[in-house]
Image (cartoon, grey):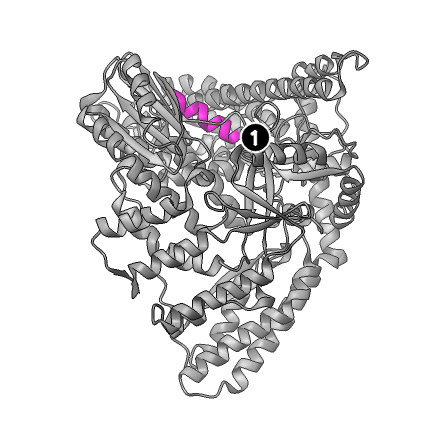
Amino acid sequence: MEEFKALEDFEQVATATQWNLHLILKPKVKLWSIKNKNYQILSKRVKFDLLPKFIDKIDNIDSSLKIDESIIKQDEAQEMYNQMRQITKDFRTQTMTLHIQSAAREYEVILHQVNSIIEKFPQKNDDDESDAEIGYAAFKQYHELPSRGQLQQSTTGRRRNNGPDSSTFTRRGLLGPAIINQANIKLTEQEHQLLRLGPRFIFDDPKTASRRRTTELATLKRKLEARFFEKKVSPGRPVKQFIAELDVLLQNLHNIPSTRKQIQFNKTQTNKSFDTLSSIIQSSQPSQSQVIIRPRKKKNYGRIVKRLKYKIHLANTILRKTDKSKVFHLGKVDHYQKKSEEYMDNTKAYQCLGAIDPLPDLIQRTNKYLLDLRLAKWITQKQYEQLSIKPNEVELAHLYYLPKAHKPGTPLRPIISGLKHPTIKISKFLDDLLRPLFDQMALDSTVTSGFDLVKKLQQWSRNNFRQDTLFCTIDVTDLYTMVPQIEGVLSLRKMLDQLKLKQVGKLKVETIIRLSRFVMTNNYFSYNGQFYHQVRGGAMGSPLTLTISNCYMYFFERQIVNQIRNSSGLYFRYIDDIFITINWPVRHLLKEVDRWNKFDENIKLSANIGSIANFLDLNMENREGQLYTTVFQKPSYEPYYLPFNSIHPLHMKKNIPFAMLLRAIRYCSTFESYLNEREKLRMALLLNKYPNKIIDEQFNNVLVKFGINEPLTPVNYNRFRQKIIDSPIKEKLSVNYDKSIFVHFTYCSSMKIFPIKFHTLWDKYFDKSPINEVTPILGTRNVNNLQRRLIHTKSKS
C-alpha cells in the first residue's frame, strides 16, 4: 500500500520527461533484479561446489571409462584414468567459468543502463519543466522505500552470507583446485578435502600460539629493555607491567575458541548460511532433485594430518607440491628414484661419495679458509666473525624434487635445500654485494616481470610492429647445472672489470673471486642416504648461483643483443628465458638460432617462433599487424590461491584479488580479454572460498587507487588502462630502525582485535616515557601450514 501511494504521488507531480524515464526504468529494474539473483545463485554454487545438474552429469562420462588391466599395464591405465579426470575437471571448470562470466556481464550491463537512466533524470527546474525538483523528490522517495531498495543494496550489502568453511560439505569437490594422486593411494573424504586446501592452508591452532607466547613476550621484553638502556635509563616498572598485562591479554585471546559462547555463535552463523543457500537453490530449481547439504562437526585437523602422514608412509608414497601449480601431488617412491638416477646420469654434474659424510671436513675447511684470508688481511676481523661457522649451527644441504605433473611422464625439478649449509653465509654475503651491480649492468637487456615486458613491448611496437613481426621465446637448458664453475666465477671478474671497480663494500676484487670460487666448488648434499659433491654448475638453492648464472649469460648474449638491436628488434632475458621480437623472415631467424647455439658448448637454446608467444605470465599475439596481450596461464595452472578460510590476517587475503586484477588490467590490451580474465579470476577466488563481497570490494579498490571513479567500459578501457600502466610504482618506504621496534606474535583466529589492544597498551605505558619516539611495528608469525606439516624433503638416514 505504501509503495502504491508513493507511486501515485510521483505520478501526480512528475514532469512528462520524468514519467517517461520512469516507464523506461521500471522494466530495467525488474530485469536487473532477475539477473542479480541469477548471478548470486551461480556464485553460491561455485563457492559451495554444487554444480547445476546438466554439468554434474559429466561425472557419468568420467566413470564410464573402463580399461582392461589384463591387457594394459596398470601404470599406463592409471595415466589414462588421470587424463580422463583432468578432461572432465577442465570441462566443469570452464563451463562454470563461462556461466559466471555471462551472468556477471548481464548484471553489469543492465546495472550500467539503470544508472545511466537515473543520471539523466531531471533534478532541477529549468525553463521547460518548472516542477522537476518536486518530481525528483517524489521519485527518490518512491525508490528508497524498503520494497524498492534492492538496487541501492546491491552495491553495498549483497551476498552477505559467506557460508561455512571448506570442511562443511560431505561431497567430494568437483571443481578445482585439485590434488594429483598419481600414486593412486586411497584417501578418505576428510583426507581428500584436507589436501584440496593446498600447501599454504593454515588451520586454527591457538594451542601453538599459546605455547609460543612465553618466548615471544621474553623477546619483546629484551628489545624494550635494550631501548631503555640506549637512553641510559633503567626499564623499571612500566616494562614489567606492560609485559604482564600483555600476557593476560594474550592468554584470554588464546582461550576464546574453547568458550561455549563462541561455539554457539559459530553454529548459529553456519546454520544461517545453510538456510540461505538452500532457499536460493530451491527457489531457482524447483523441478530438480534437491541437493541435501549436511553440516559437519568441526574437524580435528591435527588428527587428520597425523593419520594422513602415517598412511602415506605405509603406502611407499612421496607427497610434494607440484613445480608450477603449487597443489599437492602424490607419487610413488620408485618413480622419484628412477627419475633422480636419470637426471644425474644426464647432467653428469654430481659425484657420489657413498656413505662418507663430508660435513665435518667441510666445516673445518671453511673456517680455515676464512682464517687464512683474515691473517692475510684479505678480510677484516668483523667479516671473519660474520662468515665463520659453528658446528652446531650448520647441516649439509639435501636434494629433493618437485614433480612437473603437467608434463608427460612427470619429470622432476631438482632443488638443493641448503639454508644451513656451511657456505651459505658466504654465498648470501657475496650475493648481497654483487646482485645490485649485475642489475645495474644488465638493466637494458633484462626484465623483472611480465609487466616490465608489457611496457617495453608497448613502446617498441608504436614504430616497429608490422604484419610480419615475429615473436621468439628461447629456453636455456639446465642453466644452473651447465654453467662451468671456474668460467662462471670468472664472469664475475669480467663484470667488475667492466664496471671499473677495484673493490666492493671494502672487499677487494681478488677476495670476491676467491670466496666465490670456494662457494662454487664446495657444494655438497645428501640424497636417499648417500652423499654427493656437485662438480658442475651451482646449487639451485644457493643465492650466489643465480648471480653467477646471470653474469655468465650476460657475456654469452652480448653478440646476440647487438645483432637484434642493430636490426631494430627487441631482446630481453629473465634468468634462463629469452624473449625476442623482430621483423625477420622465419627461416633467417631459425638459421641465426642455430648459429647462436654454437657460441658456447655449455649453453643450449631451444626456440619457439611464431606470431603468438608466451613469456613468463604474458601472452602476446600479432593479429594483422596489431599487438594483442593478455595473461598467460601455463598448462600446469590450477585455480589455487591462499584459501580464504586459512588462518591468515585478512589484509593478506584481500591483497590477492587486488593484485591479480591489477595484473589483468595491465596485461589485457582489449576490454573483452580483460572481462574474460576478470571472470576467470573471480571463478578461481570463489573456488578458494572468497566471498563475492570481498572480491567486488577489492576489484573496485584497484580503480579507486588510480583515481578512476567510473566502471570500465569498452569506451573508456584503453584510456584508463594506459593511465594505470603509466602510473609510477611507489617505492617501499624505508624503515628508520633507530625509531622502530618490530614485534611478532603468533596469529590465530581470535587475534583479530589484538593490534588495537596492543597499541592501546603501548600508549598507556610508553606514550610519555623516554622511548616515546619509538614506533612499534606489529607483525605476525604463522603456525605451520599444511606443506610444513605434511611434507618432509629431507630423507631419513
Question: Which residues make up the magenta segment?
Answer: 672-682
The foreground one among 99 and 366 is 366
Residue 673 included in the magenta stretch of the image? yes
Tell me if I can see residue 334 in this picture: yes
Residue 586: x %, y % from top left: 30, 14
Q: Quadrant of the N terminus?
A: top right
In the image, residue 350 sits, relative to residue 357, either above or below, namely above
In the image, residue 146 sits, relative to residue 245, either above or below, namely above
Residue 386: x %, y % from top left: 44, 69
The foreground one among 126 and 228 is 228
The foreground one among 279 and 577 is 577
Tell me if I can see residue 163 in this picture: no
Residue 193: x %, y % from top left: 71, 36
Q: Is residue 637 left or right of residue 194?
A: left
Residue at 60% x, 17% y is 91
At label 1, the amino acid type is Glu
The foreground one among 242 and 211 is 211
Q: Secondary structure at mark 1?
A: loop
Main secondary-structure element of the magenta-colored stretch: helix
Residue 750: x %, y % from top left: 63, 57
Residue at 43% x, 34% y is 661
Q: Which residue is mark 1?
A: 638
| Quadrant of the image occupied by residue 659 | top left
Residue at 41% x, 82% y is 230
Residue 793 included in the magenta stretch of the image? no
